[in-house]
Image: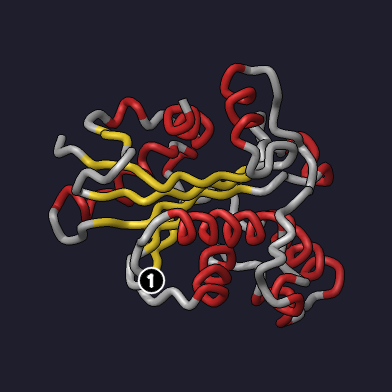
């Protein structure tokens, strides 16, 4: 496998937020990500913009905002967004409306689609490189990761912004909720060229089947 390099790592989760000390404690198992609906405040965005955003979208906007501030990445850089569930709470509301009322309200539907988190970030920060959205086959994060970095390995792109996010699956999903019900988002710059303080990845086995496994690899 051709080497690729990961840098500019940003992350956010309830209970840990942006605190690097807490993230290191998470890595050692001393603290856990809280299973609550807490979201970043997004105080750097317009109040009308952030007012109706979900947990997953707010987390996505926040980690991309922090990555842009942490790196000199161009706003023309392509983004690949990965999620296992997308806007799952809004989807429940949409489906409930169809069953009970036989209709969908346009305002609710517009924020329920799978690309809502990443498209909201591109609007917030004027990003012009375009984006792709990926749902991992059989919930295997490593499969989506391989697809995301394929343009780098093929030489058609020099770098991409990789973003993962999933929100808390609400209680009303009952026993259909996943065992790993962790609200979390992270972003990183993946490049075909080595950068300062970058992590070299030359083996896909380091990625892992779950996003949490991959984030542990990035944080350690």
**Can residue 104 be seen in the rendering of this structure?**
no
Q: How many marks?
A: 1
Q: Which residue is mark 1?
A: 75
Closer to the camera in the image, 15 or 140? 15
Q: Quadrant of residue 179?
A: top right
* In this view, 59 is above or below 107: above
Q: Position of residue 197 (x, y in %)?
A: 33, 38
Residue for point 19% across, 48% down: 193
The answer to whether residue 61 is above or below residue 206 is below
> Which residue of the protein is positioned furthest toward the right in this rendering?
100
Image point (68%, 36%), residue name: 181
In the picture, measured across the screen, residue 8 lies left or right of residue 36, that is left
Closer to the camera in the image, 168 or 48? 48
- Is 141 left or right of 149, judged from the image as shown? right
Q: Residues within 10 Å of mark 1 (few under 14, many from 20)?
A: some
Q: Measuring from the top left, give residue 8's x and y in whole percent.
A: 41, 48
Q: Secondary structure at mark 1?
A: loop
Viewed as shown, does residue 206 lie left or right of 220? left
Residue found at x 72% / y 71%: 50
- For the N terminus, give its image quadrant: top left
Kindly tell me whether residue 141 is visible in this rendering. yes
Q: Residue furthest bottom?
A: 106
Q: Quadrant of residue 51?
A: bottom right
Structure colour scheme: secondary structure
Q: Position of residue 215 (x, y in %)?
A: 49, 34
């Amino acid at each position: 496998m051709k080497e690729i390099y990961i840098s500019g790592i940003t992350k956010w989760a309830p209970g840990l937020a942006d605190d690097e000390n807490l993230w290191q404690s998470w890595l050692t198992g001393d603290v856990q990500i809280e299973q609550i609906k807490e979201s970043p405040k997004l105080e750097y965005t317009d109040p009308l913009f952030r007012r109706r955003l979900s947990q997953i979208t707010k987390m996505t906007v926040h980690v991309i905002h922090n990555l842009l501030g942490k790196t000199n990445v161009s706003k023309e850089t392509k983004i690949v967004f990965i999620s296992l569930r997308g806007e799952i709470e809004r989807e429940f509301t949409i489906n409930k409306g169809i069953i009970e009322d036989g209709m969908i309200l346009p305002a609710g539907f517009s924020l329920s689609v799978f690309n809502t988190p990443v498209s909201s970030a591109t609007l917030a920060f004027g990003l012009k490189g375009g984006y792709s959205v990926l749902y991992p086959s059989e919930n295997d994060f490593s499969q989506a990761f391989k697809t995301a970095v394929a343009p780098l390995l093929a030489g058609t792109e020099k770098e991409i912004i990789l973003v993962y996010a999933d929100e808390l699956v609400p209680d009303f999903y009952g026993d259909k909720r996943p065992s790993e019900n962790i609200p979390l988002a992270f972003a990183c710059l993946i490049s075909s060229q080595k950068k300062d303080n970058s992590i070299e990845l030359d083996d896909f086995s380091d990625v892992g089947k779950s996003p949490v496994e991959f984030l542990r690899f990035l944080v350690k």
